[in-house]
Amino acid sequence: MSGKSDTCLSRLESWFAAECNGDWEHTYGIKLETVDNPGWMFTVEIEDTPLSGRPFTTITERASDSDWLHCAVTDDVFRGIGGIVSLERILTIFLDWAENSESHP
């Protein structure tokens, strides 16, 4: 990846902007929190988006105590939780799935 348009944050901004339709953003949203492992939890409410009801294969990875993750979709909520160095990978997993899903009605 190169350039601002290819960063995880710019990709997330673009996805969020596309979902802001005057309704979705007032009811649903995205949360980024820390957890006490220490690590991260990234949550996206996907109800009323093109992702609602799309299949997602749960992903679990563990390289070390600080580099691990678990990403799943349950009840129209994408949740990625991981170690302190796993945030970018969690975001990439969500964005790769979201961007791929957009091209498959």
Image (cartoon, helix red, strand yellow):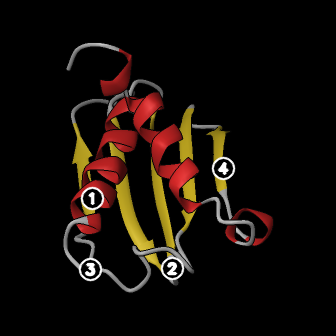
| Residue name at image x 33 percent, y 30 percent | 67
Residue matched to label 1: 97
| Cβ–Cβ under 8 Å for marks 2 and 4 | no
Q: Residue furthest top?
A: 3
Between the residue at mark 3 and the residue at mark 4, the CA separation in whole angstroms equals 21 Å
| Residue name at image x 55 percent, y 50 percent | 16
Disc number for residue 31: 4
Q: Residue furthest front?
A: 21
Q: Is residue 87 left or right of residue 28?
A: left
Work out whether residue 49 can be spotted: yes
Residue matched to label 3: 55
Q: Earlier in the sequence, mark 3 or mark 4?
A: 4
Kind of residue sitting beneath label 1: Trp
Q: Earlier in the sequence, mark 2 or mark 1?
A: 2
Q: Earlier in the sequence, mark 1 or mark 4?
A: 4
Q: Secondary structure at mark 1?
A: helix
Between the residue at mark 1 and the residue at mark 4, the CA separation in whole angstroms equals 18 Å
For disc 1, the neighbor class at 10 Å (few under 14, some 14 to 19, many from 20) is some
Q: Nearer the viewer, residue 16 or 22?
A: 22
Q: Is residue 26 left or right of residue 105?
A: right
